[in-house]
């Protein structure tokens, strides 16, 4: 799929998953973590999904999918994840008729979007896809990214986000702000963070920000 990559804010969105196996379980977990309202339609579910149901994070319709269920629920996103191609296609058709966007675990061509392998270092999110060519390759690339992008970058991203309003107020020139951020990224801040030297990292970070501010 030659698609357009986006990061959706699904907070409060109703999302329906048709299927209750391992794939459905992973998708439900990711959606719950992002604040979505998750409904699963399936005669049976995995232990992990059952735990989500018991915790009140997922609503389970314990039945096989039949036409009309998606239209009645009016979700914004629909995920098909059953082993029955005819069921998946029927759910996709109904979802489209209801105006929902569809993800199909079997890479059905009529689906609207695909899920990407995701590495999270909050607030950093890195997503990648091989276009369905090789899930194994996607997993390998994720492992390599995980080694390259350590927790130090998450901390640095948080600090940059915190200081950004102040920098924008005191450095109205975009080029000056860009130079400051590049100086921080090229400095010893990341090295200190990587070694767990939080105080030293913060001291260098704050000094660079202070030095960049014009005299008042």
Image (cartoon, rainbow, N blue to C red):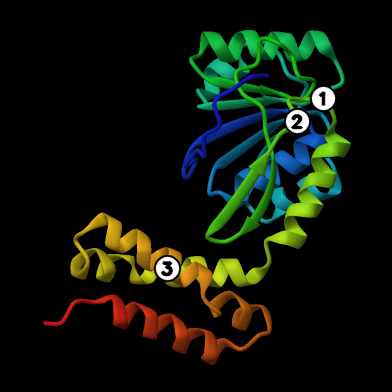
Q: Which mark is residue 130?
A: 2
What kind of element bears circle 2? loop
Residue under label 3: 160
Quarter of the image for the C terminus: give it.
Answer: bottom left
What kind of element bears circle 1? loop
**Residue, x 81% and y 53% (percent of image)?**
143
Residue under label 1: 133
| Nearer to me, 182 or 2 | 182
Residue 190 percent coordinates (x, y):
58, 75
Residue 49 percent coordinates (x, y):
77, 45
Q: Give the Cα distance between marks 2 and 1.
A: 5 Å
| Nearer to me, 14 or 31 | 31
Q: Give residue 91's quadrant in the image.
A: top right
* Left-right relation of 140 to 131: right
Q: Give the Cα distance between marks 3 and 1.
A: 36 Å
* Left-right relation of 12 to 125: left
Quarter of the image for the N terminus: give it.
Answer: top right
Residue 50 in view, yes or no: no
* Left-right relation of 138 to 52: right
Q: Verify CB contact (< 8 Å) between mark 3 and mark 2.
A: no
Q: Earlier in the sequence, mark 3 or mark 2?
A: 2
């Amino acid at each position: 799929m030659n698609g357009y990559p986006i990061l959706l804010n699904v907070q409060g969105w109703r999302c329906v998953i048709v299927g209750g196996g391992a794939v459905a379980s992973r998708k439900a977990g990711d959606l719950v973590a992002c604040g979505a309202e998750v409904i699963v339609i399936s005669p049976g579910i995995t232990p992990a999904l059952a735990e989500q149901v018991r915790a009140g994070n997922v609503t389970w319709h314990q039945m096989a999918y039949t036409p009309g269920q998606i239209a009645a629920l009016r979700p914004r996103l629909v995920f098909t994840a059953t082993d029955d191609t005819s069921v998946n296609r029927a759910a996709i058709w109904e979802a489209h008729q209801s105006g929902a966007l569809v993800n199909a675990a079997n890479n059905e061509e009529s689906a609207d979007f695909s899920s990407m392998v995701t590495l999270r270092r909050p607030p950093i999110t890195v997503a990648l896809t091989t276009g369905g060519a090789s899930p194994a390759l996607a997993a390998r690339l994720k492992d390599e990214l995980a080694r390259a992008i350590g927790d130090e970058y998450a901390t640095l991203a948080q600090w940059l986000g915190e200081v950004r309003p102040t920098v924008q107020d005191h450095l109205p020139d975009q080029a000056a702000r860009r130079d400051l951020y590049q100086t921080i990224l090229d400095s010893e801040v990341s090295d200190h963070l990587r070694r767990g030297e939080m105080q030293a990292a913060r001291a260098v970070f704050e000094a660079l920000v202070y030095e960049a501010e014009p005299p008042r």
